[in-house]
Image: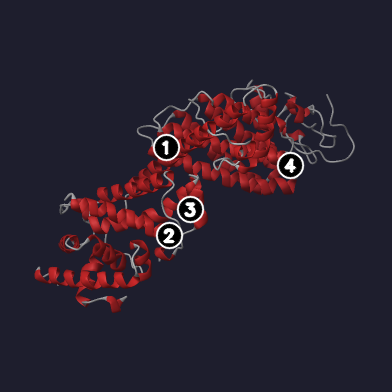
Amino acid sequence: MENNVPSDPDLLDLARKFDHQALARIYDTYSPGLYRYAMRLLGDQNLAEDCVAETFSRFLKALQDRRGPDNYLQAYLYRVAHNWIVDQYRRNKIQPVELTEEHLDENADPEKDAGLHLRQERLRMALKKLTPGQQQVIALKYLEGWENEEIARALKKPVGAVKSMQHRALATLQRTLGSEDLL
Amino acid sequence: MKDDRMNPKLDNPFNDLQNIPPRNPQSAAHGRANFLAQAAALRQAVSQQADQRHNRSNNTIFPLFQRKERLPVLNTLIAVVLALTVFFGGTGATVYAAQGSLPDQILYPVKTWSEDAILSLTGSAQTRLNYALDFSDRRVTEMAGLLAAGKPIPDGVETRFQNELDLALELTAGMDDSQAIQQMSQIRLHAENQLQIMTTLMAGAPGSPEPLLLMAHSRLREQVQLAAMGESDLPGFRMRVMQRFQNREGSGEPTPGTGNNPQGPGPMSPTQMPGPSGTGTGNGPGSGMNQPTLTPGQYGQGSQMPGQTPQSGGGSGNMP
């Protein structure tokens, strides 16, 4: 699992010197996961690409300002990405994406695909009703498969607090989705 | 993980969100190229800031060489160049400050001059090879920085880059077999990394890539092929390098190693050319290297290539 890859302090040291190979390796290692993460929460390929681009751009600026992660690069990048996503939510830029041909595999069942797309959009809308922290806990836990300890590191919170946020988030989701008769 | 789930019914929608379309490879490549170009531009900016800090400060001579961006292998000879420059009335700080400059900046000629001086002062083929590879990395960084700033790549940068790649090949061809094969993989890996960067830069370039960028990309592909050839067929590699050298000499391209050439030091100094017999002392130019009638077949077993360390034995390496 990608999140089992430990952050490499040596890689970060090189990145702080803007070493080309180190930065390329960081991008190649983490950008696919960040894209998937953004895509699952945003449901829009262009926005997901924007999210990845902005995340890595902020990472570079942090390095330039001698800030950025000390050790846990993955946790740092997902935190930055999630903050960007939450900003998009707040600006109300995220609208349900219209179902277009690019969403549909021509070999698949269109009715099934349309149903999947609809369920995805409703779950995203339900996730938007959570607090930013709850969204991140749910997304990292159930979409990315992270352990509570890793989520705690990303959120800079104790593990107990993460479990508590998770509990409240699931209860809220259950109410929201149940009320919409999705399940 | 299941213990954390409050309602098993939620499994279904979460699984639904796992199902997303694959990332567009072109968008991914474009994003990667933009990121690396931004990184290259920031690296240049950081280097210049460091230079400015240096110029404002009252550093002693030792902190002068502790600049993080410098390649460690350069420190000793930069120190020599600086000392000589200061000794002869120049400004050592200018040489130092020039190291992070881009080709469109006023200090860039100082940077290339110091590189040429370093190569001229270096006797060891292994050390020269390390410098050649380091300097070629600088050229790639410069090209990335220029592209990130939306500026064209000057012809001289690409020419220097090609000369540095040639120098690496020719120095390696001149090493003994075991050392050459060992260095060949280093050259190949170096070129592969640079090729990857070039590919990224080309993918990120708006519109058609610059012709000079295409040339550099093509030359790197050739470098990878030649190094791979050297790893599997060292005599064949030496022959190819010899032919390339002769072609360049015949085309009237700048004489390498003079140190005064704006396009770089070039591959070899004429004074380092061994004779074709492979048995001389190796202190003078061999007759074979500059013979226009020389054919590859004349380089049989025991023959020497540009920069090759002569083997002991009879014969004279000082042939006219």
Tell us which disc is closer to us: 4 or 2: 2
Residue under numbered circle 1? B202
Kindly identify the amino acid type of the residue bearing the numbered disc 3: Leu
Q: Mark 3 packing: few (<14 Cα in 10 Å), some, or many (20+)?
A: many
* Residue that extends furthest to the front in the rendered view of this protein: B58
- 1 and 2 marks in contact (CB < 8 Å): no
Q: Residue B175 — which label? A: 4
Residue under numbered circle 2? A72
- N-terminal of the pair, mark 1 or mark 4, is 4
Residue A43 in the image, given as x and y percentages of width and height: 22, 55
Q: Quadrant of residue A170?
A: bottom left
Left or right: B30 with respect to A88? Answer: right
Q: How far apart are marks 2 and 3 (CA)?
A: 9 Å
Tell us which disc is closer to us: 1 or 3: 3
Left or right: B31 with respect to A116? Answer: right
- N-terminal of the pair, mark 2 or mark 3, is 3
Dot 4 lies on which element?
Answer: loop
Q: Distance between the residues labelled 1 and 4?
A: 34 Å
- In the rendered image, residues at marks 2 and 3 fall on the same chain: yes
Provide the chain ID for the residue under circle 3. Answer: A
Provide the chain ID for the residue under circle 1. Answer: B
Q: Which image quadrant: the N terminus of chain B?
A: bottom left
- In the rendered image, residues at marks 1 and 3 fall on the same chain: no
Kindly identify the amino acid type of the residue bearing the numbered disc 2: Tyr
Q: Mark 4 packing: few (<14 Cα in 10 Å), some, or many (20+)?
A: many
Dot 2 lies on which element?
Answer: loop
Q: How far apart are marks 4 and 2 (CA)?
A: 44 Å
